[in-house]
Image (spheres, grey):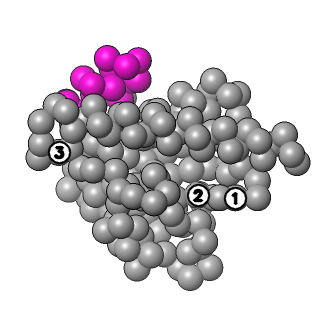
Amino acid sequence: MLPRPPSKVLVVCLGNICRSPTAQAVLEAEIQKAKLPIQVDSAGTEGYHTGAPPDHRAIRHARRRGYELSGLRARKVDPADFSQFDLILAADPSNLAALRHRCPAEHHHKLALFLGDRPIPDPYHGEDAGFEEVLDLVEHRAADLVSQWQSATLAS
């Protein structure tokens, strides 16, 4: 990952109403528990839902686990994001490819998949179980990332 923890992390999916706001909220909760000075935001590679809250199903499932998404609003990735964020985590290879296409070459090292080696499945066109699966995957990975960042903080 990184030699030192990031100070600003951006999580990106397609429309910024399911996976990336869920990952943002979960990651923020883990970071807060660890008392790390890391800011998290989320965005979409497309602006289909700009200004809209997350999908009502994402809000409902996240709330059941203690995460609040209702105050978040969808936005599209801005060109300035590539310089402002230390780490940009895509939900899936398609969004990672879109980010690589738009990202200036000097910032390509900041781009990665959120789960590291596989996509976060898109629950938007599915049933409730998909939103639960996203939460399971994101919770596990967020805990792992924050643990890595804590270790890097202690080592420095």
Q: Is residue 66 above or below residue 111?
A: above
Quick one: label 2 or label 3, which is nearer the N terminus?
2
Disc 2 residue type (three-letter) = Leu
In this rendering, position of residue 61 left or right of residue 97: left
* Residue at position x 17%, y 45% in the image: 124
Question: In the image, residue 58 lies at what x, y percent?
Answer: 26, 32
Q: Is residue 54 above or below residue 87?
A: above
| Residue at image point 60% right, 71% down | 109
Task: From the viewer's side, name the closer residue of 45 and 111.
Answer: 111
Assess whether residue 58 is covered by the magenta stretch.
yes
Crowding around mark 1 (Cα neighbors within 10 Å: few <14, some 14 to 19, many 20+) is few
Q: Secondary structure at mark 1?
A: loop
Residue 87 — which label?
Answer: 2
Q: Residues within 10 Å of mark 2 (few under 14, many from 20)?
A: many
Position of residue 141 in the picture relative to residue 70 (left or right) = right
Q: State how far apart marks 2 and 3 are (Cα).
A: 25 Å
Can residue 16 be seen in the rendering of this structure?
Answer: no
- Residue receiving disc 3: 124
Residues rendered magenta in the picture: 51-69
Residue at which label 1 appears: 2
Q: Position of residue 76 (x, y in %)?
A: 34, 57
Q: Position of residue 52 (x, y in %)?
A: 24, 41
- Contact (CB < 8 A) between labels 3 and 1? no
The reply to whether the C-beta atoms of the residues labelled 1 and 2 are less than 8 Å apart is yes
Q: Can you say whether 131 is above or below 119 in the image?
A: above
